[in-house]
Amino acid sequence: MIDVSDPTYPLRVGWYDTPGIASGVAVSGGFAYVTADAAGLQSIDVSDPTNPIRVGVWSNGASLQDVVLRGRYAFVAGGESGLQVIDVSDATNPRWAGGADTSSFSMGVAIDGTTACVADVWGGLVVFRLDFTGDLDGDGDVDLSDFTAFQLCFGGSNIPPAPTCPAGVDADLDSDGDVDLADFLIFQQNFSGSL
């Protein structure tokens, strides 16, 4: 942790020695998420910069290299395990949400909208399309503007989407012909807030 209030004299105010080689970091909501090689993705409470405390960890045993945060997810360049997606909505209990293999060893990751780009040692640039189910306005997140559209489409079980549903909006998230509580539960699970 570095105090840069005087950029000509940066001052270290705190640190946390990860159990593995720290190679990537992303910060959000008072938590730093650090990729620490085979020691996993470390969740570190940095709300008191003078006393960072590890509160959680996720590991698959691979050499985790880099991390980018998007809403409730950490996208991790997972070394030999490719791209890993970790749900960090509870920093004390990060959980695996999904993943995809790359051709060899993932070193870096970047996200732009619904595109994830992974730098892979032998595979070069590997590009993935991200699916944000519930992103009804197509802006790459599931937030209150999507909820507004969802409400306008809500009709109930076994009833077609409401006539107030905006043109081009498909709020039938479970594809059963109606917009009901089951669709709301899917929407709620994917709600990320504005990114």
Image: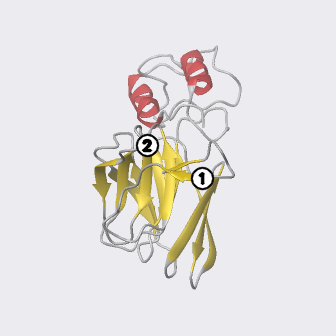
Q: Position of residue 24 (x, y in %)?
A: 50, 63
Q: Position of residue 66 (x, y in %)?
A: 50, 64
Q: Residues within 10 Å of mark 2 (few under 14, many from 20)?
A: some
The quadrant of the image that shows the C terminus is top right
Q: Nearer the viewer, residue 81 or 21?
A: 21
What residue is rendered at 61% in x and 32% in y? 136
What residue is rendered at 63% in x and 50% in y? 114
Looking at this rendering, what residue extends furthest in the front direction? 9
In the picture of the structure, the residue carrying the numbered disc 2 is 49
Q: Nearer the viewer, residue 161 or 109?
A: 109
Q: Position of residue 73 (x, y in %)?
A: 46, 47
Q: Which mark is residue 128?
A: none
Q: Is residue 105 above or below residue 86?
A: below
Query: In whole angstroms, how far apart are the C-alphas of marks 2 and 1?
Result: 14 Å
Q: Nearer the viewer, residue 14 or 32?
A: 14
Circle 1 SS class: loop
What residue is rendered at 47% in x and 61% in y? 76
Q: Position of residue 23 (x, y in %)?
A: 48, 68
In the picture of the structure, the residue carrying the numbered disc 1 is 10
Report whether 173 appears left or right of 152: left
Q: Is residue 3 above or below residue 110?
A: above
